[in-house]
Image: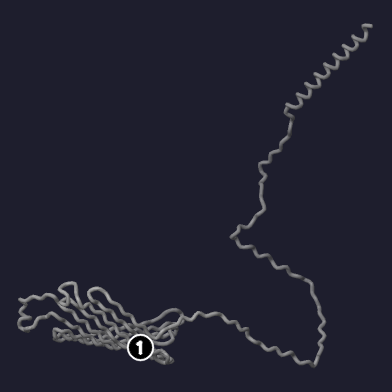
């Protein structure tokens, strides 16, 4: 009766010892570093496929050439038919064009302190294609000056006419003008010997100028030969018996060659003749 407990305890002990050995073997395999083999090659170069940059041009690939020869047989067919007539008609499109309304003249008027009226007017005639004519007038006066009222007043008046004539080769521009400036002085030197000899008080001085000018230049501004010739003559008088006459002449000539070089000539002449 005591044999079975002995056998059972013996088998249980053997199983327990075997389980410990298996668990120890599993723990050793899990934490143990296994032997590995590594091959290191120092002369090996790692390369990547070449890729073009975004701004680099794409290389031109060679055009494939075919060595095959093709032979075609052409058979003419003569037909007595008339070609179809096609009438070409341009396409009509109406684009909106903004045309600014222009006026032949204007008038401007104003009034300010020191009793200073302003009047300016201009009128042009441009209906003709070969010439244009215009006239203008401007007056601005300060009837009461900043010192002693009317004794420091001044008046500025200017009027004139413009004309322009167009031809197939050149254009001519002319101007005729008149200007009158009046100044009143609120003080003078009573001990001036010259004023005592003349026996008058220089409280007013009136400057008057009459002038005429003209200019001629070519119509084609892209031509090889370019020239501008102008003149201006004027006569100036004042209230102190002084007179001055002046004249000026200007010439500019320029020629441009096909290779980009050019040659030019400029001249200016002015003469003045004052008189008392």
Expressed as whole percent of the image width and height from the top left, the position of residue 111 reads: 28, 76
Image quadrant where one finds the N terminus: top right
Q: Name the residue under label 1.
A: 134
Residue 81: % across, % down: 78, 92
Q: Is residue 214 at all visible to an observer of this figure?
A: no
- The single residue placed furthest to the right in the displayed view is 1
In this rendered view, identify the residue nearer to me: 271 or 75: 271
Q: How is the image coloured?
A: one colour
Residue 40 found in image quarter: top right
Q: Mark 1 packing: few (<14 Cα in 10 Å), some, or many (20+)?
A: some
Q: Whole-percent x and y of residue 114?
A: 22, 74
Residue shown at the point (25%, 84%) measured from the top left: 179
Most extreme residue toward the top is: 2
Residue sitting nearer the eye, 158 or 24:
158
Q: What is the tally of numbered marks visible in this picture?
A: 1
Q: In which quarter of the image is the C terminus?
A: bottom left
The answer to whether residue 42 is left or right of residue 27 is left
- From the viewer's perspective, is 174 left or right of 72? left
* Residue 262 shows up from this direction: yes
Residue at x-position 78% and y-position 24%: 26
- Residue 261, by quadrant, is bottom left
Instruction: Looking at the picture, tell me which residue is in the foreground, 246 or 77.
Output: 246
Q: Residue at x 52, y 80 (%)?
A: 97
Question: Quadrant location of residue 231?
Answer: bottom left
- Above or below, 34 against 49 in this view is above
Q: Which of 234 and 34 is in front in this view?
A: 234
Residue 43 locus on image (x, y percent): 66, 43
């Amino acid at each position: 009766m005591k044999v079975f407990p002995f056998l059972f305890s013996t088998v249980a002990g053997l199983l327990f010892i075997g389980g410990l050995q298996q668990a120890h073997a599993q723990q050793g395999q899990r934490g143990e570093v296994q032997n590995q083999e590594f091959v290191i090659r120092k002369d090996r170069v790692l390369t990547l496929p070449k890729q073009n940059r975004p701004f680099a041009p794409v290389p031109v690939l060679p055009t494939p050439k075919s060595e095959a020869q093709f032979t075609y047989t052409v058979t003419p067919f003569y037909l007595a038919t008339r070609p179809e007539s096609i009438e070409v008609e341009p396409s009509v499109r109406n684009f909106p064009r903004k045309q600014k309304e222009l006026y032949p003249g204007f008038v401007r008027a104003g009034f300010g302190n020191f009793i200073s009226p302003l009047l300016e007017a201009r009128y042009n005639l441009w209906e003709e294609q070969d010439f244009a004519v215009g006239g203008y007038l401007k007056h601005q006066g300060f009837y009461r000056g900043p010192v002693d009222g009317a004794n420091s007043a001044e008046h500025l008046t200017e009027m004139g006419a413009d004309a322009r004539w167009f031809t197939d080769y050149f254009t001519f521009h002319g101007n005729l003008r008149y200007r009158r400036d009046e100044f009143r002085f609120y003080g003078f030197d009573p001990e001036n010997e010259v004023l005592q000899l003349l026996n008058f008080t220089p409280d007013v001085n009136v400057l008057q100028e009459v002038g005429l000018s003209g200019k001629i230049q070519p119509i084609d501004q892209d031509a090889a030969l370019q020239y501008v010739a102008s003149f201006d003559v004027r006569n100036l008088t004042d209230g102190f018996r002084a007179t001055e006459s002046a004249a000026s002449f200007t010439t500019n000539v320029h020629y441009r060659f096909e290779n980009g070089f050019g040659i030019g000539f400029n001249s200016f002449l002015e003469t003045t003749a004052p008189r008392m």
